Image: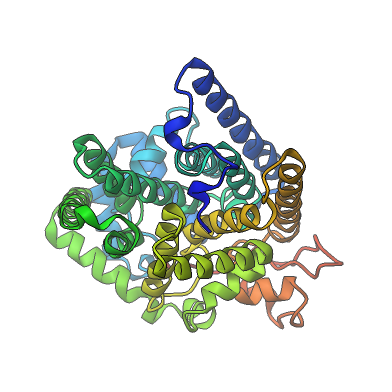
Amino acid sequence: MDSETNTSDRSPSSEPHGLRHVARAAGVSAALALGVCALLVPTLAGMRYGYGTDEAYYLRYMEAVHEHGLAVLPRVTEEWNSGSENWIYPPPTRIGLSAATGLWSLVRPPSMRALSEFSIACTAAFVVLNYLCARRVIGEFKALLLAVLLIGNCLALGLGRRALSDAANVLFQSASIWSFYFAMQAPAKRGRRILFTTVFAATILTKEIGALLSLAFLASVPVCFPRDELWTRLRVAVGSIGAAVSLSILGWVTAAGGVDPWLLAISKLLGSPATNEWAQAFCSGPWQRYVVDQFLLSPWTSALGLLAFGATLRERAEERANTPLLYLTCVYVVQLTLLAPFMKNARFGAILELPLRLGAVVFLVELLLRPDNLRRRIAVAAVVLAVAFAQVRDFRAIFVEGQLYDPLTVHLVRHREMSPPLKSQAEFGTLPESGRARGRRRASNDMPPEDE
């Protein structure tokens, strides 16, 4: 599945670098961003927010930073540490997210709607970023197909309209994934190392779970990149990741107002699942729960992506694998393994949709685009558009009409009409009635607390 030698795309070195090239990329990026906004902004009119959930805490932090600046975070952290009722909710030590929403509040005054609009902006930036990065390594045509599948991403669209941190997390995680890839492609370039270190530190400071990517990055170096500079790449990777983690710790300690308050906040955050009955009931299970959720949310891209992973790993043994896809395959496998010991929620593994969608694109191109001609390109584009359209339809049914707050497995199974209704759906959140009776609303507006 060596798409780097496929004639359907030009190699990065043969791409024009003039004004026309820049203008085309800018035009496509603007169209992609507008497409995301067109899908998500109209859905905010009927949004119901969880004022007793994580969304309320993120709004509280946004209001505090808007009024007093980042210097208020140590006081907010002290308040969070002092009340046990806070520990199942996100801590204020996520200074990266607070800084971003604080800047956003200069444009849009703090409100749930403003946080939703921030999530939409992050989702649009996520699609544009991945298009611009992918076109450098897999060519324009496949990058466009990837962007279409990312716009038609049921989970990303569902999270991209909420007043939560998930859209920002996915944006920063994808930026870290690409910046590390480009740094390893040219380990001698200091600018790329600095860029990765900065982006990865921001990723960790947006949400602690981003730190798990460090092990995926390290594992990818001997597996996915040329071996002629293996030790150089390992030194660069370890040094850059170490610097990013150090900056993150400094940011956490600064936000908490000292080492002791930060350690206390971390201990409460890590220990909260033990006292969170809702999380124990709905976010437990084996590692494959993430894969099950991916198939429930995006069956076609999940199937095609996993098939592409298998083919890529086989070709890795023959030294002819597609390097970008092999790299993202490694990220997927390692990240899935590392998420296994923690609470299981599709939101926490939302970044895994990126490797799956790139795999789906490569698989379809290899399957249908040989030989390469206009008719076959139209056929591939039609298949991708059909898959994206089906995903948008599922997004509207599950998240908009069904008003689903959290994409838990039990809710997704019910949406796919694979189980009867829950007996106490009013207690555990809004659920779509069924595929044929979408849009019904439950009587209660209560939503479950979450631990992020």
Across and down, in percent, residue 223 comes to 32, 64
Report if residue 89 is visible in the image.
Answer: no
Across and down, in percent, residue 445 comes to 66, 62
Relative depth, front residue between 202 and 449:
202
How many numbered circles does the render carry?
0
Q: Is residue 403 left or right of 3 when viewed as pictured? A: right
Q: Residue furthest top?
A: 19
Residue at 46% x, 66% y is 315
Quarter of the figure with the C terminus: bottom left
Across and down, in percent, residue 305 comes to 57, 63
91 up-or-down from 338: above or below: above
Residue at 23% x, 35% y is 191
Relative depth, front residue between 246 and 65:
246
Relative depth, front residue between 433 and 8:
8
Residue at 28% x, 70% y is 268
Report if residue 327 is visible in the image.
Answer: yes
Q: Please, which colouring scheme is shown?
A: rainbow
Residue at 43% x, 77% y is 276
Q: Is residue 94 left or right of 436 when viewed as pictured? A: left
Across and down, in percent, residue 42 comes to 71, 39
Q: Is residue 139 left or right of 203 when viewed as pictured? A: right
Q: Quadrant of residue 366?
A: bottom right
Q: Is residue 258 left or right of 115 when viewed as pictured? A: left
